[in-house]
Image (tube, grey):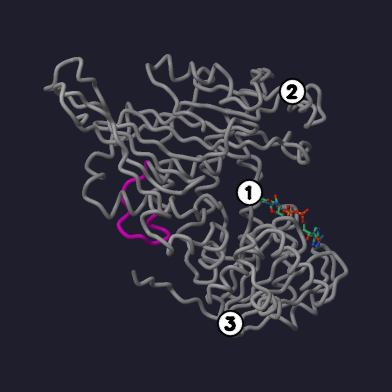
Amino acid sequence: MVSRVIPVSSFDLVIFGGTGDLARRKILPGLYRRFSAGQMPENSRIIGAARGDLDDDGYRKMVADAIKEFVPKDRQDKATIDGFIDHLSYVPIDARGDRGWKDLAKLVRKDVVQAFYFSVGPGLFGDLAERLHSFGIASEMSRIVVEKPFGRDLASAKSLNAVLAESFDESQIYRIDHYLGKETVQNLMAVRFANVLFEPLWNAQYIDHVQITVAETVSVEGRGAYYDKSGAMRDMVQNHLMQLLCLTAMEPPSMFEPDAVRDEKLKVIRALDPVPTTNIVRGQYGPDGDDLGYIDHSENPDSTTESFIAMKVDISNWRWKGTPFYLRTGKRLKARMSEIVIHFKETPHSIFEEDAGSHANVLTIRLQPDEGMDLRVTIKEPGPGGMRLVDVPLDMTFADALGPSAEDVPDAYERLIMDVIRGNQTLFMRGDEVEAAWAWTDPIIEEWQARNERPVNYEPGSSGPEDALMLLHRDGRKWGEVR
Ligand code: NAD
């Protein structure tokens, strides 16, 4: 297979917060991998900018250590690491003061793509945006990358958007949701819009319901104070699960082009029905033997923050009326897995005898682990004994189907950073999308606050609270296993 990689032009990438956890764990290892794949043009540069007092050599050492820690061993190569860190420099900077800005202005070139990654808390976005202009660093060609959390409600998201809009045009702002950078998520669009098989069936007439699960095994240990102000709804549903829902439910865009795709996603968010509390289950994991429970991790004995949520969401439009989307996410669950599962309806009439069994097709789109897709189809069980039906998977695990080329699939951060350099916003959230998602989320959270209800307890290492199972049982349906 001939792989076609769209080249990137030379760039200066400034990472504000370049010594932080996100930069060390994701951004810099991701850039190293693109460098080792030959995708970083020779005269491109990466400039770390943060509060710490480092010089260039100190920063290069820090980044080399981060690569050794966070890049798989078989992808590490001393000569490549040395080659990569040659592209690095560092500027100590204060986002809120004057320190470092003149030095940065001298370093950043005007004749190459300039990208500024705001890998700092959102409280600093406005300071950075303003100084990039007042020190004459940013130009019309600059791009800025911002991280979640993008606000904690509609009002704060609007004010963040307004702060950024004072200095940058929407076409220069890249709001990252790393779920959108996953190979399978883009494959969902390929499967839907590049095959004739699925799209005619992709509606309430043929799809019974959709399940979207993002399950994590980790607890909130170490970030309990932050998480306690957020909870699963703000931390996961408003952004990641919402984006997956949008890509599954949206109408075909006229072109695979940023605003065409984002317009269609926005229409889905605007068509979401308000969710009654009876269609939501909130959970909090308890302690287990020596393992602490959520309350201990959050350090707030009265915390009513949810570490798990399951909800039934209805979309009021022609395509989806009557086909619910069930969303589920939580911490400290049995397994780490993310998937979108499309449950098709049974055939309208079975020509086989009743004991042949009744079956329905299921399309599973796995984001992690083992990115891939699997379509369950019904066939005759081989052998004698009459017509008995069985479900078998048509498996499309990318690593198996595509061979070695699948191993070179960039991870979400690598792909998204390269898209910033290419100037392609398709996989980034637009400001109005983020605001629409908060407008849908806010009343749900406000109602919980008004009721001050405690989430139900669930056992760590389980699939979540019993009530979440009931949410589907009462509709005659069943969650896929968390495995
Ligand atoms: P961190 O606390 O580890 O690092 C913060 C960085 O910002 C440091 O490099 C620090 O020097 C710099 N900084 C802080 N105040 C500054 C100032 N006044 N001037 C200049 N630099 C300053 O944080 P992190 O975990 O790397 O997270 C960065 C951002 O990314 C946050 O908004 C976070 O919510 C978001 N995020 C992080 C992760 C993650 O996995 N760590 C995941 C998603 C989103």
Q: Is mark 1 within 8 Å of ligand 1?
A: no
Label at residue 150: 1
Q: Are marks 3 and 2 in contact (CB under 8 Å)?
A: no
Task: In the rendered view, tell whether residue 267 sits above or below residue 143.
Answer: above
* Label 3: element kind: loop
Q: Estimate the x, y position of residue 244 in percent, counting from the top left.
A: 46, 43
Kind of residue at disc 3? Val
Residue 31 lies within the magenta run = no
Kind of residue at disc 1? Phe
Q: Mark 3 or mark 1, which has the lower sequence index?
A: 3
Our reading of the magenta stretch's main secondary structure is loop
Specify few, some or many for label 1: CA neighbours under 10 Å numbering under 14, 14-19, or 20 or more: many
Specify few, some or many for label 3: CA neighbours under 10 Å numbering under 14, 14-19, or 20 or more: some
Ligand 1's quadrant is bottom right
* Label 2: element kind: loop
Q: Estimate the x, y position of residue 241 in percent, counting from the top left.
A: 51, 40
Separation of residues labelled 1 and 2 (CA atoms): 31 Å
Q: Residue at point 50% right, 71% down?
A: 422
Q: Is mark 2 within 8 Å of ligand 1?
A: no
Q: Estimate the x, y position of residue 274 in percent, counting from the top left.
A: 48, 28
Task: In the rendered view, tell whether residue 169 sits above or below residue 250.
Answer: below
Q: Residue at point 31% right, 28% down?
A: 208
Separation of residues labelled 3 and 2 (CA atoms): 53 Å
Horizontally, is 49 left or right of 138 in the view?
right
Q: Which residues are magenta?
A: 249-261
Q: Which residue is mark 3?
A: 112
Label at residue 287: 2
Task: In the rendered view, tell whether residue 94 sits above or below residue 228.
Answer: below
